[in-house]
Image (cartoon, grey):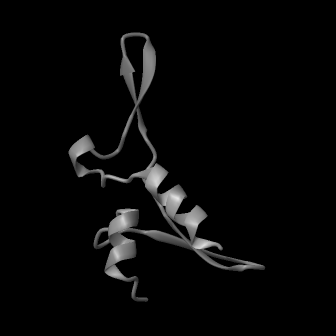
Amino acid sequence: MVIPASIRDRAGLLPGTTLDVSVDDTGIRLERVAAGPTLVRVGKRLVARPARAADERPPIDVAALVEEERNRWP
């Protein structure tokens, strides 16, 4: 499956990114599968730590994505 570069960049899709594909009444939906956080014991507490370092996570401007979607419809 080929995903246009502009969409890949906006969604932060990198080579090897795992996608979940689902079908409903309106079409096909692709969702990035993100690794869940790991629990690390800090003293007596469990703390959730992201699976990837901050500099490894793609920058995603959620507000811009929402605005683009709103403007997509007349």
Of 59 and 67, nearer the camera is 67
**Is residue 72 visible to us here?**
yes
Residue found farthest to the top: 44
Instruction: Work out whether 49 lies above or below 71.
Output: above
**Is residue 13 visible to us here?**
no
Residue found farthest to the right: 25
> Which residue is painted at 37% across and 83% down in the image?
4
Within the image, what quadrant is residue 5 found in?
bottom left
Residue 37 horizontal/vertical position (percent) = 43, 40
> Which residue is painted at 64% across and 72% down in the image?
73
Instruction: Work out whether 40 lies above or below 58.
Output: above
> Which residue is painted at 48% across and 59% down in the image?
65
Of 66 and 24, nearer the camera is 66
Residue found farthest to the bottom: 1
> Which residue is painted at 35% across and 44% down in the image?
51
Residue 53 horizontal/vertical position (percent) = 25, 43
Of 74 and 16, nearer the camera is 74
Residue 45 horizontal/vertical position (percent) = 45, 15
In the rendered image, which quarter contains the C terminus?
Answer: bottom right
Within the image, what quadrant is residue 43 found in?
top left
In the rendered image, which quarter contains the N terminus?
Answer: bottom left
Residue 59 horizontal/vertical position (percent) = 31, 52
Of 60 and 54, nearer the camera is 60
Q: Is residue 17 left or right of residue 29?
A: left
